[in-house]
Amino acid sequence: MIFVLLIVGCTSNSNTDLKTSEDPSDSISFYDKKAQNLEYSLEERKHFANKAFEKAHSELNTKRFARLSYQKNYLHLSLGEYDSLLVYDRQMNRTRFMNAPAILAMQEYLMGYYFEAIIQQPDSAFVRYNRSKFYYQKESDSNGIGKALLNMGAIQKRQNDFFGSKETLTEALKYIDQGKNAQTYFSTLDRLAQNHRRLKNLQEAEALYDQILQGAPREDLPTYKNNLATLYIDQQEFAKALTLLKSIPAQTFEDSNSLKARVLDNTAYAMWLSKIETPLEAFLIPLELRKKANDHIGSMASYTHLGEFFMTRQPQRATAYFDSVIRISRKLNVPRAELDVLHFKMKLDPENLRYKDRYIALRDSLYESELKVKTQFAKYKYDDQLKQEALLNLEKQNVENELKLAEERYTKLWIIAALVVAILLSVLIYFNQKYRAKRLKDAHRIDRLKATYDTEAAISRRLHDDFGSGLNNVMLMLQRNAGNEQVLDRLEGLYDQSRDFSRTLNEIDTGAGYSQILSGMLREQTPEKTNLLLLGYQQVNWGRLNAVSKITLYKVLRELMINMRKHSAAQRVTLKFSNMSQQLEVIYTDNGRGASSTDLQLRNGLQITEKRILAIGGTLTFETAPGTGFKAVIKLPY
């Protein structure tokens, strides 16, 4: 049986570190990646999957929660924790996750494998594979549809529904791309050929094997050659069978004792049937290989061949081997194997009515059982199709109801909107007039503030010129041979005063270079041992601020930086710039000493900055206390 578990997500690096964050989605993603990392053990991956699953409970009905649920189920299956697997499978069925058909397809496929391979319930496995096919169809995943049908056909074949299996496998071939999935494609052809063999359509089976041997992957050819050899044995073409079996390379058996046992047993059987001297060991060696591997089905084939081998030589020994087949067949519930050896036992003891009665009863029972199986699988398909169509109709009905409700809501909204527009139009003129008056008032206030800034700039220029006369005095001191130290001290004092006055009162470029000037000022005002962090600075649209607002922001931020340098002793300063719809918000924070409300009132520079902001229609609020750092929130209108 071909079975592929599909894991969603990519393998993460084992050195990934968890980032500290308050966002719960970050931790979910972190644990999710850990759970997918194949470098961890299954137990470790389950631990991470449980963490992600617990944190994602608020995301119920989302695709991510569906994928986390599937991943959790996959790990439970891999660890043999079948009780947990069933619990969370029921949870997924209750939630349904109809918005995640790909995840549901993989979950149904997973459960199909569980019922088929783990607890041997072919009916339940068939239903789950069929549901998987339905969800893969919703996702238009041809490869997934083909694999689901392949497993369904394999179950039908093992239940002796050869016609139904042939139909299902033929449908699977429509979806499996030979180029992309050659192994799956030729495995499907192999099962189809085996169905034809069981139905005695030997020529059709041989034609399929010719196709398989011409195109199948090299590593699968030994298995297909062995299967074709059994077909030749059925056709009594023993020479062909032996030639084919002997062409299988010996190194093929290094990784597969199961294949080795089949090839050796079929070789011995073909030699014996073709009247070639065959030693007993030729049958016993593959039997021992099968017993060591707990291959009960293969053991029944070996016991059957040994029984045939001893029928004429040692009838009692042959009967013992046939009895071994019956014992295993009853244990595995494979009645057809018992029926086959009863046929041989009746030949050994024709007068034994018990064998004949058992043979007839078993044959009739098998006929009824196989007829029931054929109708049962067809019913499973039909019932599940009706169920899925009902789900689709329910989804469609829900969508239609939502559309109808949405149309009604839109109609009501249009009516309400019309009323609102009418009311707004009636008051628009009033507010428009009021707004125009306010704009004129604000314009006058801005003009006055701009005049103040212009005056400050003029004062700055004049002061700078005055310092020129101071420099002239220094030159006279030099001509009079004044002491060097005296002259240098005078020069340094004049330079420092000139620079400070110039930066305090000089004009500010509010044009294209404003961003660089502002950031340069902030860094100049930052002490060496203080870290300055600007967040969102590059995203600010400075063109939306008028010149007055730019100057005001510059002076307010400079005052905050001066205040920090003088009073705060902060080690970290953060300025966060945020573009709002109608305003620019700047949040200043530092981790310095902080200040009390009394301290704020005594600091004249901070009071002046607040007045500057209010003058242009903005706001400035302070949040601070001794020992808690300092925070200021500035909001400027665009």
Image (cartoon, rainbow, N blue to C red):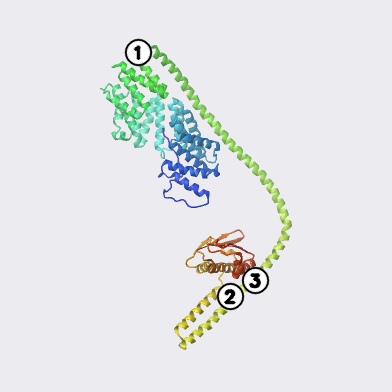
Q: Which one is closest to the eye, mark 3 or mark 2?
A: 2
> Of the numbered discs in the image, which one, if any, rests on residue 349?
1
Distance between the alpha carbons at the discs numbered 1 and 3: 123 Å
- Which residue type carries mark 1? Asp
Instruction: Identify the residue shown where x is 49% and y is 52%.
Output: 20
Q: Is residue 381 visible?
A: yes
Question: Given contact means CB atoms under 8 Å apart, are the residues at marks 1 and 3 in contact?
Answer: no
Distance between the alpha carbons at the discs numbered 1 and 2: 126 Å
- Which residue type carries mark 3? Asp
- Which residue type carries mark 2? Ala
Which residue is labeled 2 in the image?
A: 457
Which residue is labeled 3 in the image?
A: 447
Q: Which one is closest to the eye, mark 1 or mark 2?
A: 2
Mark 2 Cα-neighbour bin, 10 Å: few <14, some 14–19, many ≥20: some
Q: Earlier in the sequence, mark 1 or mark 3?
A: 1
Return the x and y of residue 253 as percentages of the image width and height.
31, 33
- Quarter of the image with the C terminus in it: bottom right
Return the x and y of residue 557 as percentages of the image width and height.
56, 67
Q: Nearer the viewer, residue 419 or 580?
A: 580
